[in-house]
């Protein structure tokens, strides 16, 4: 058969308007693809073209990815264990700091009580509960701080592939490796790649933005939900707005963004509705504002080792705010609920 | 894929080699849709296409440490994909071949059936019509026409008389004939093919 006719059959088949004979041709080629080099090239071209097209409208494959990832994690778990549990613990040092914090390092996808020699530990997680700050040390010597209500996780092959998955906020002080190997912090919308540097990442799931502030060195940021590539220089802040999908780069004073790790609560001229998110995480309380106007008030203040009451007192002196702290209540299950604070306009 | 260039690709592949799931996810995000479309073009079934996408990416992960990229990741992916698509296509083609025998049985002009450009429609119509049959009849029909079992075998398997099996098959073919007739009021040529009595 002539080449032109071949092409016609193939094209008809792909478009869905084909005859039985076209189908038989395609069958013949695919069964013996090595005999039909030109058809193979055609298929390669078709694939190439598809990858150059914008198929954004097509089928959503996110759930398929989750299925694949699940299979991978399951397989990895069943593959032979490379590290002994004891040696492992020595590599994971999570240091607890003031006030007494509960930090949990646990392994999931694996049963902690019955560590088995055959199973490989899949992930390590470091948690910092609400109202706490946790210092962590990673196996490669990099260190950092986790803000309240945040966690990081990484897998045991961390030394070979330095990849940390963060949710919430953390400050990283990354150890530079002589082989220039990368250290990657992943958050849902971005990958932040570094060589050796100090920077802050904020990606709380209840905020509508993710933010990276660089103190020292150089980082590269690759967008995931929206594709972008940005190199950050010291004293630059990158803000990615989750809904608008905008990337904004600004020059900032990095101190207010990183001071939290040294125990300072910094309200940096943000509207109150944003500041209360910070206060809520800092003191592990729930704050309600019953006035829309009040939400727009801006505050600039720095607190160090101050009680919640002192902070609220301070706010009420400088602005027309009244506050009320409710007694902690016990819910139906006998568990203490978070302390609740109400803010009103005077 | 605006910002896709060689440097980014090298970085992602290096990440993949070291076992970074986030690099792997990045590759999935970039290539899963075109790959899915490519599979769909040849397999004509979204389920099968998804299976292939899964197979291909699992393979990419499995081979991550020894991955050798000659020209580009794209062509590496294509090589794996082509193998997987072929495997699935050949399996599906076997099933379709048997369906073709049923279509021939339903038609009067074999020659015409084989050159008309509505083969995919016919397959779809056949599948949908089979789905509409009462469950016992469908079971008998599939065993006979798709699995190629004999009347006796089916009778034994289902614990019914051979006569009953035969009855189900006759009724099933009659039903298909009516369905094909009903669906072809749009004036397609093959309307004429199916009016011959069974």
Image: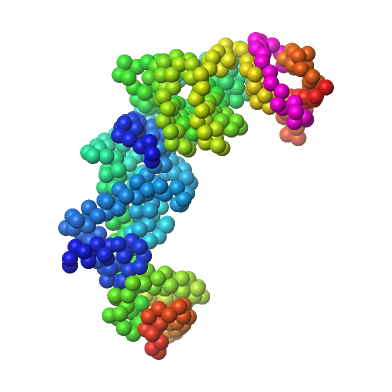
For this rendering, which residue is in front, A328 or B183? B183
Farthest residue to the top: give it: A304
Whether A298 is among the magenta residues is yes
The answer to whether residue B182 of the structure is visible from this angle is yes
Q: Is residue A245 above or below residue A142?
A: below
| Residue A142 seen in this snapshot | no
Q: Position of residue B59 (x, y in %)?
A: 32, 44
Question: What percent of the width, then of the height, locates residue B136?
Answer: 49, 75
Q: Is residue A194 magenta?
A: no
Horizontal arrangement in the rendering, residue A90 relative to residue A264 (left or right): left
Residue shown at 41%/30% (left/top)? Answer: A229
Q: Position of residue B42 (x, y in %)?
A: 33, 59
Viewer-closest of B191 and B178 = B191
Asked whether B124 or A18 is in front, the reply is A18
Is residue A272 depicted above or below A307 in this figure?
Answer: below
Tell me the magenta residue range.
A290-308
Q: Quadrant of the N terminus of chain B?
A: top left
Chosen colour scheme = rainbow
Residue A17 in which image quadrant: bottom left
Q: Quadrant of residue A178?
A: top left
- Residue drawn at x 64%, y 22% is A270
| Residue positioned 65% across, 26% down in the render | A274
> Viewed as shown, does residue B145 lie left or right of A225?
left
From this view, report whether residue B45 is shown above or below residue A305: below
How many dots with numbers? Answer: 0
Q: Give left or right: position of A24 versus A192.
A: left
Query: Which part of the image, by quadrant, shows the C terminus of chain B?
Result: bottom left
As drawn, the residue found furthest toward the bottom would be B197
A115 and A108: which one is in front? A108
Q: Residue at x 20, y 59 (%)?
A: A32
């Amino acid at each position: 058969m002539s080449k032109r006719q071949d092409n016609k059959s193939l094209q008809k088949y792909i478009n869905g308007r084909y005859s039985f004979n076209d189908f038989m041709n395609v069958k013949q080629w695919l069964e013996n693809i090595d005999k039909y080099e030109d058809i193979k090239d055609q298929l390669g071209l078709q694939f190439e073209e598809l990858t150059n097209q914008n198929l954004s409208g097509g089928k959503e494959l996110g759930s398929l990815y989750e299925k694949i990832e699940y299979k991978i994690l399951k397989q990895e778990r069943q593959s032979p264990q490379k590290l002994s549990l004891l040696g492992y613990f020595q590599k994971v040092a999570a240091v607890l700091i003031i006030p007494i914090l509960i930090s949990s390092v646990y392994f999931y996808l694996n049963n902690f009580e019955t560590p088995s020699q055959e199973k490989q530990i899949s992930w390590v997680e470091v948690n910092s509960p609400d109202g706490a700050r946790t210092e962590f040390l990673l196996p490669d010597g990099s260190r950092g701080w986790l803000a309240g209500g945040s966690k990081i996780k990484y897998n045991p092959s961390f030394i070979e592939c330095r990849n940390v998955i963060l949710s919430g906020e953390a400050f990283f002080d990354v150890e530079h490796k002589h082989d220039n190997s990368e250290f990657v912090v992943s958050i849902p919308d971005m990958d932040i790649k570094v060589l050796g540097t100090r920077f802050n990442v904020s990606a709380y799931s209840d905020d509508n933005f993710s933010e990276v502030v660089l103190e020292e060195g150089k980082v590269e940021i690759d967008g995931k939900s929206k594709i972008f590539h940005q190199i950050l220089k010291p004293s630059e802040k990158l803000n990615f707005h989750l809904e608008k999908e905008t990337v904004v780069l600004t020059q900032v004073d990095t101190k207010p963004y990183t001071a939290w790790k040294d125990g300072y609560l910094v309200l940096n001229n943000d509207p109150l509705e944003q500041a209360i998110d910070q206060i809520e995480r800092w003191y592990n309380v729930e704050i309600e504002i019953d006035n829309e106007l009040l939400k727009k008030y801006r505050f600039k203040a720095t607190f160090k080792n101050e009680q919640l009451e002192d902070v609220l007192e301070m706010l009420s002196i400088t602005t027309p705010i009244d506050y009320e702290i409710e007694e902690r209540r016990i819910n139906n299950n006998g568990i203490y609920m978070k302390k609740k604070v109400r803010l009103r306009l005077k | 894929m605006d910002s896709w260039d060689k440097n980014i690709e090298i970085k992602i592949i290096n990440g993949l080699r070291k076992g970074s799931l986030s690099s792997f996810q990045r590759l999935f995000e970039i290539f899963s849709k075109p790959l899915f479309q490519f599979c769909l073009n040849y397999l004509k079934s979204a389920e099968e296409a998804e299976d292939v996408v899964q197979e291909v990416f699992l393979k990419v992960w499995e081979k991550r440490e020894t991955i050798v990229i000659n020209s580009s990741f794209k062509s590496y992916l294509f090589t794996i994909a082509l193998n997987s698509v072929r495997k699935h296509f050949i399996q599906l083609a076997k099933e379709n071949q048997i369906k073709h025998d049923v279509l021939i049985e339903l038609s009067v002009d074999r020659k015409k059936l084989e050159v008309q450009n509505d083969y995919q429609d016919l397959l779809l119509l056949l599948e949908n019509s089979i789905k509409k049959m009462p469950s016992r009849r469908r079971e008998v029909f599939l065993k006979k026409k798709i699995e190629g079992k004999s009347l006796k075998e089916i009778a034994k398997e289902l614990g019914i008389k051979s006569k009953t099996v035969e009855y189900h098959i006759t009724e099933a073919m009659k039903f298909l004939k009516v369905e094909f007739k009903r669906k072809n009021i749009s004036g397609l040529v093959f309307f004429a093919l199916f009016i011959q009595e069974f």
